[in-house]
Amino acid sequence: MTSSSRKPETAAITVGKPADFAEFWAETLRAAEAVDPAPELIHRPGLSTDRVTVGELSYTSFGGVRVTSWYTAPAAPAPPGGYPVVLHIPGYISEPAVMKSWAERGYVAIDLAPRGKLRANAVVDPGFPGLLVDHITDRFAYTYRGFYVDVVRALDVVAGLPGVDAERIGVWGSSQGGGLGIISAALRPERVRCVVAGAPYLCGIMAATRLTRSYPYEEITEYLRLDPGHEAKITETVSYFDGLNFAADVRAPILVYLGMEDDVCPPETGFSVYRLLPEPKTLLTYERCAHHAGLRWAVPEVEKFLDGFLEPSGAIA
Amino acid sequence: MTFDDYWAALDAELAAVPARPTLTPVPARSTEDYSGYEVRLTGLGGHRLFGYFSVPAGPGPFPGLLELPRHGSVNNPPHHVERLRYVVFTLMHRGQRRADEPFAAAYPGLFALGVTDPATYVYRAVVADCLRGAEFLLGRPERDRERAGVVGDDLALLTAARRPGFTAVQVTGPLLHNAMRLRHTTGEYPLEELNDHLRRHPGDEERVLGTLAYFEPARHAAAITAPTLVALPGVPPRPWTDELLGALGEQLDTYQRTDEDAIDTRALDAWLAGRLGVEPKARFVS
């Protein structure tokens, strides 16, 4: 079976947008903003080199949950105006990376650990598998609500860090990081200079469960195997969290890359969210590629795209 | 301690620990095509390990498949297309999610934990966990006694070398192999953990080398009696040494990745399916 018989380019996936979608997210962000993020950057000399400073960046997010991300920066003093930032969002089963190579390219590079990831799971730990369906029948309690906010608040926190140019923040991720790149750019358009979204997850969520047997969407299939009567409720909840309902609010230039035989995040969902994104936007597709979405060829394009908008002052010699 | 004595001691220590497996049916992961279970079993030091176990429906017998965990905290349950064809066990070694009490692994942090002494290196216990997983799968009555595969990074080589019941071995990439040399080629974790350690403790280099020598897959490979596929990266450098590939001898088969991962996944699936006597299946569904 290949993508040629599925025609993902023309597949039309739609997600109903709840009437109170904007109100739900305004209320959510108000609640988040009422919490002092109390950011703290702890230097980790054991992981640092003579060229890269490594630290852990902690802040308090929605519901008072404290989360901790990896921070890397060039060891040299920041230039006037500060360093540009690449904010990376990890995938569903990935742990955040220590992005030394990006710091060596002249960025403050931060890989987020939203709630549930290691070092951010002391209070909220949905387990894996499990995050996608954790409290999924109540949008107010859905674990992804706080998880999304953890990414949004990271943008606020990072913009206030010393040595950072708050006008040059780029967001990048693949899979969950791709979907949340789109979503966070929609929720904080004033913070995000550019976005790269690879194989975006959390887009066309319910449709995806019918297009794949791979995790994480398989979690919903398993849930409904036991509780088929919850389908309407789950469909309602995830409509508040679906990237298709955020895409039109993205204001930053965006690069999207897709694998045309992606069994994890079906390419139909990637095309559907891409169509809803405003210009300027760029789409790269890779035949014969699955969830890696042509990473070998996409990464040089990602670097070029981010460098073009964020203008790092140059790689460390 | 000699290489053989080191591993014989580990085998003896593990053998003295009853596995005491418990299987809990998981209706959500059970269909008309297979039955899913969650497994807990005891490893070295009494640590309770975790795994996902699935058995195809029907008379069988079905080949067994041990999926060793990737280097990372979280691993998915076995995929639908594996559950359809194999009696499959997906192990979480100590420290990984669901096997993280009382010890939770840090990432980064696990790879170099205790690396200055082979007696304390965490991978002594991690390898033992893989061996325990192999014992569990190979001992299951649902499995065809003549067919069993193991897949994973180079922990699969150590596992197959020390538990000879496997009839196919598939190695997707390096972890422990040639680590002290490969660490110079990257700033990425987990190898960067060795760089971090030696930056702080440069005098430890010989001790680290000595520890990792016990775990070098090239030293284990000659004991493997099953056909073994080693995946080669799509772009240089090739991580596998001639010593390792040579040690596999006639068992060696290689696959050159294209980095078009739908192609690569299908090719690796087809190789394993061919060795274990089942039909290839693609994950990208119609």
Image (cartoon, coloured by chain):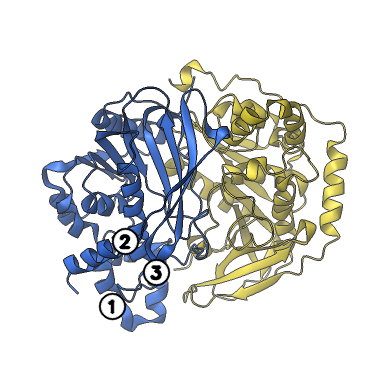
Q: Is residue B62 left or right of residue A67?
A: left
**Residue B213 at x, y percent in the picture:** 23, 67
- How crowded pointer 1 is (Cα within 10 Å; few <14, some 14-19, many 20+) is rated as some
Q: Which residue is mark 3?
A: B112
Viewer-nearest of labels 3 and 2? 2
How many angstroms separate mark 3 from mark 2 (CA)? 22 Å
Mark 2 or mark 1: name the one nearer the start of the chain.
2
How many angstroms separate mark 2 from mark 1 (CA)? 25 Å
Q: Which residue is mark 2?
A: B14
- How crowded pointer 2 is (Cα within 10 Å; few <14, some 14-19, many 20+) is rated as many
**Is the same chain shared between marks 1 and 3?**
yes
Q: Tally the numbered discs.
A: 3
- Under circle 1, the secondary element is helix
Residue A5, placed above or below residue B15? above
Q: Is residue A86 left or right of residue B179?
A: right
- For chain A, the rendered hue is yellow
Q: Which residue is mark 1?
A: B207
Q: Looking at the picture, tell me which residue is in the foreground, B266 or B61.
A: B61
Chain identifier of the residue bearing label 1 in the image: B
Chain identifier of the residue bearing label 2 in the image: B
